[in-house]
Image (cartoon, rainbow, N blue to C red):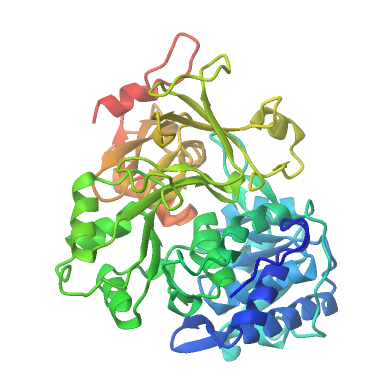
Amino acid sequence: MDLRNLGDDPLEGNAAELHDRTAAVDGALTAIEADGESMTHVELRDRSAAFAGGLHDLGVEPGDRIVLYLPNGPTYVVASLGGLKAGAPVSFMNPQYKPREMVHQLEDTDAEAIVTHWWLRGTVDDALEETAVDPVVITAGDREQVPDDDHHVDDVSGDPTHVERDSDEVALQPYTSGTTGQPKGVQLTHRNVRAQGVDMLVDDDENAPLTPAELKSLIWLPMYHITGFIHCGWQPLLYGGSLHLRSAMRWDAADAMATIEALDISHFVGVTTMYVDMVNDETFGDHDLSSLEVAAEGGAKMAVAVQREFEETASVDITEGYGLTETCGATHTENQTAFGHREGTVGQPLQMTDSKIVDAEGEEVMPGEEGELLVRGPQVMPGYHDLPEATESAFTEHGFFRTGDVARRDPDNYYEIVDRKKHVIVTAGYNVYPSEVEELLTEHDALAEAAVVGIDDERRNEIPVAHVVPRPEIEPGNDVTADEVKQFALDELAEYKHPRHVEFVDSLPRTTSGKIQKYKLRDDH
């Protein structure tokens, strides 16, 4: 195959064009498999172009945002690729979100359309009642379950459409939260998305470990997550590989290993929890995992014992990488390093990516020294949606993005992520922002204050633990219980965010300026 003929600037133009080129070369190969059904690359190309035309027929214009509130499935791929072809920036939304979590994103995007699944339809209604937006609702799944006023996804079909877009126009708008304030819309341009795909489009038959027909990506990570979309889906798809989609809400370690064996899966990207679950499953060792050529992990450090046990059984190295939503996925990886796999690191910076580590004054530190990781490259966002001050503070005067993570590098330019500068809790690959949980907990009638911290957990990396101060008239255990507080959070937030433990305390430790000393709460565990 030779997909390198991308013109003078391979990063210029609508990102969806890259898959059209793939379909022109490897069109007869399987692109998507899910629930026993499949779709070739040509069929995906044609269906997504028709979907783009259908969006325009429904009034969606280039530049209008469409929100995907969906579980993993073929519709996710068709709708996202179709949105790109329609010139409509695609905004991913976590299908575990409850109505209160959806409102800000719906309003901030001013969503012109929302694509969902029938069993999520009631949640969409509840969220829309709290907003001023009135998007077209496109629903997937069993037609008999779809409301009469909705447009079934299969009926959204018009003239094949492919809108030309400038490389600096927005292609994707996922959302990420800081430690304070509302979630921020990350503007990822067509250039950003193309940059993460171009590496897969180089003809290198002598060194490529897999042909397009052999590249089979098992996607169990949620596709609303940038890793799930870019590294599990986008890159293998552009290479001509096949995406084998499974529901992120129904993760099963034994099923995953059986699937790898049955389908000769060659590409799997997971989070630490998934590898821990596989190694600890009673069927581990019973399945032939030797088809894996790529086994990758990101989001949190993996225990060395787990990594080595998996590697010995599967006969493949688990490679780590590093990236953020703001960087449209990876900035560092072990897959393209000069000296191969190096345990405990996230590898070296990607091609076209500048990376450095600086101290508090912004001066670059020497190898082995710790500091904040800064990155710059064609995959890095231009900024946050309608947040000029947040955008300005996120970048240095020389255009480096401040990751907020503490790192160090060795003399061979391999990077290691040491800690998170922000108070983000990483649990089973999901980011939990304590301020969001704390704000909710203080809405409980029995609670006056709350502080949430991440506590080390062997399986999930960290778990959220809430320290709550009851109101003066409340007696813990009688007037309110820890289980009631946990259920209160569970009713209002995605399941992975709710505190796994709730501890009642008389007061929270503070500095003289009134800031909560969260390190003291962590040290108590």
| Residue 172 located left or right of residue 289 | right
- The image quarter containing residue 248 is bottom left
- The image quarter containing residue 115 is bottom right
The residue sitting at the top extreme is 512
Q: Nearer the viewer, residue 231 or 150?
A: 231
| Residue 343 located left or right of residue 146 | left
> From the viewer's perspective, is residue 115 above or below residue 109?
below
How many numbered marks, from 0 up?
Answer: 0
What residue do we see at 26% from left, 71% from top?
Answer: 290
- Residue 417 x, y percent position in the rendering: 40, 35
What residue do we see at 77% from left, 42% from top?
Answer: 386
Q: Nearer the viewer, residue 362 or 481?
A: 362
- Residue 503 x, y percent position in the rendering: 29, 35
The residue sitting at the front extreme is 206
What residue do we see at 63% from left, 66% from top?
Answer: 68
Q: Nearer the viewer, residue 341 or 58?
A: 341
Instruction: Answer yes or no: is residue 478 visible.
Output: no
Quadrant placement of the C terminus: top left
> From the viewer's perspective, is residue 56 above or below residue 201?
below
- The image quarter containing residue 217 is bottom left
- Residue 440 x, y percent position in the rendering: 50, 42
- Residue 19 x, y percent position in the rendering: 66, 72
